[in-house]
Amino acid sequence: MKDNEPMPGFDPARSKLRATVATIERQLAEMPREGNVSDGLRSAVADLVHQLALGPEPELRACPSCGKHGMRAATICGFCWTKLTPPTTHS
């Protein structure tokens, strides 16, 4: 895998969508909860988020051998192929 290739399991576009959804949700939380407009908007955003099915951001960690980031639960580094021990606790 080359340095400029995305890491396996990581999708920058989905990460950007997650950040945008979080911003919209923060803005909605600051809106007054009165009237049909805000209720309709909240409902539409909730439906959109459900349809996007983004899920949580994948958990990543650095390889102790090469230092590149990969999936937290990986058993082999996707860059240098070093065997990895999955973490036992959430850090």
Image (cartoon, grey):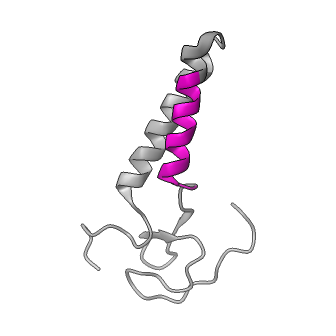
Along the line of sight, the residue nearer the viewer: 40 or 60: 40
In percent of width and height, residue 59 lies at 57, 62
Q: Is residue 38 visible?
A: yes
Give the image quarter of residue 80: bottom left
Whether the magenta-drawn stretch holds residue 51 is answered as yes
The answer to which of 81 and 47 lies nearer the viewer is 47
Task: Point out residue 71 in the picture as x, y percentages from the top left corner.
Answer: 52, 71
Locate residue 7: give its quadrant.
bottom left
The quarter of the rendered structure image containing the C terminus is: bottom right
Q: Is residue 52 magenta?
A: yes
Residue at left 41%, top 70%? Answer: 68
Point out the image quarter for the N terminus: bottom left
Q: How many marks?
A: 0
69 vs 12, left or right, is right
Query: Which region shows up in magenta?
Result: 40-55
10 or 86: nearer the eye? 10
Residue 22: percent from the left, percent from the top? 53, 36
Q: Main SS of the magenta segment? A: helix
User: Is residue 31 at all visible to an observer of this figure?
Assistant: no
Q: Report the side of 83 relative to 81 (left or right).
A: right
Q: Residue visible at 72% across and 63% down? A: 90
Instruction: Name above or below for residue 49 compared with residue 13.
Output: above
| Drawn side of residue 8 relative to residue 85, left or right | left
Q: Residue at x 49, y 42 (%)?
A: 48
